[in-house]
């Protein structure tokens, strides 16, 4: 299955059957898949977005960071975590000895909610299939969820981030470390120390896997 039209037909056929469990296996399939996602209009956010922000990073990264949704700068540039919160994320990664260019970074929602409002439940429901495809493809050893929406989407729960941050969980066989969203940290600088501890823990999980 190589051409865009074949992928499109295949996805459409799956959708008509009520099945959305295509597993994107090759980099070429992923690129075709991304082109499809860029045309997505499964939820209302398609009407107000500038760009679909699929995600970026190493396709075989050992560590994956999942945020909530693109913000204003991300929507403008079509890249995740490039604004102020993104710069903080990069700093937290670097301070813990993690390299942004060796990670994979994405969000639960691929389009920006107007005025950066919280994602609606039906928007997450419509979009989470793309996130699960990304996880299937990258096959990270460690996932860091940034903020409650990423964690709650993976575990289909409704936890508060202050209750679960720093606790190691398993999603399928992947270690998941929930921590604060960098945008929250920009508004609550006193929590940065806790976030730094979480990033250190993520680095430790990664080293433990590698040795
Ligand atoms: S947020 Fe997700 S489901 Fe909604 S239009 Fe964008 S890509 Fe599609």
Image (tube, rainbow, N blue to C red):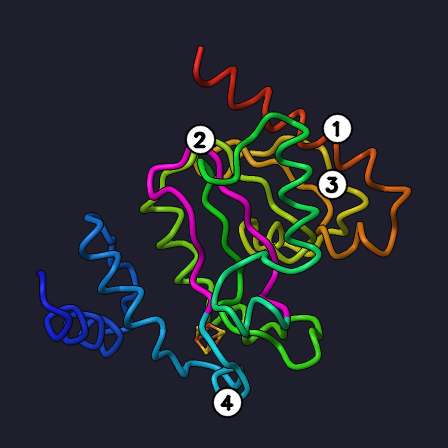
The magenta segment: 53-71
Please tell me how crowded label 1 is: few (under 14), some (14-19), or many (20+) other residues with Cα within 10 Å: some
Note whether ligand 1 is within 8 Å of mark 3: no
Q: How much space separates mark 2 and mark 4, taking CA atoms?
A: 35 Å
Q: Mark 2 highlights which residue?
A: 141
Q: Quadrant of the C terminus?
A: top left
**Of the pair 147 and 77, the residue shown nearer to us:** 77
Q: How much space separates mark 3 and mark 1, taking CA atoms?
A: 14 Å
Q: Mark 4 highlights which residue?
A: 47
Residues tagged 1 and 2 counted as in contact (Cβ below 8 A): no
Secondary-structure class at tag 3? helix
Please tell me how crowded label 3 is: few (under 14), some (14-19), or many (20+) other residues with Cα within 10 Å: some
Instruction: Please give the name of the residue rendered at 52% of the width and 31% of the height, measured from the top-left corner.
Output: 175
**Of the pair 87 and 29, the residue shown nearer to us:** 87
Secondary-structure class at tag 1? helix
Up/down of 190 relative to 154, above or below: above
Instruction: Please give the name of the residue rendered at 23% of the width and 79% of the height, measured from the top-left corner.
Output: 16
Residue 35, picture quadrant: bottom left
N-terminal label among 3 and 1: 3
């Amino acid at each position: 299955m190589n051409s865009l039209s074949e992928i499109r037909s295949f996805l459409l056929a799956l959708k008509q059957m009520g099945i959305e469990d295509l597993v994107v296996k090759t980099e070429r399939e992923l690129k075709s898949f991304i082109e499809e996602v860029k045309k997505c209009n499964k939820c209302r956010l398609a009407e107000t977005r500038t760009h679909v922000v699929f995600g970026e990073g190493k396709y075989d990264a050992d560590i994956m960071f999942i945020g909530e949704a693109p913000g204003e700068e991300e929507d403008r540039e079509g890249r995740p975590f490039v604004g102020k919160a993104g710069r903080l994320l990069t700093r937290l990664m670097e301070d813990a000895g993690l390299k942004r260019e060796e990670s994979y970074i994405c969000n639960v929602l691929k389009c920006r909610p107007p005025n950066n409002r919280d994602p609606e439940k039906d928007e997450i429901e419509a979009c989470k299939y793309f996130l699960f495809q990304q996880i299937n493809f990258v096959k990270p050893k460690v996932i860091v969820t940034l903020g409650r929406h990423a964690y709650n989407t993976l575990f289909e729960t409704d936890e508060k981030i202050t209750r679960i941050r720093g606790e190691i969980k398993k999603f399928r066989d992947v270690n998941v470390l929930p921590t604060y969203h960098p945008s929250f940290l920009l508004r609550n600088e006193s929590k940065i120390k806790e976030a730094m501890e979480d990033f250190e823990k993520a680095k430790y999980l990664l080293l433990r896997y590698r040795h």
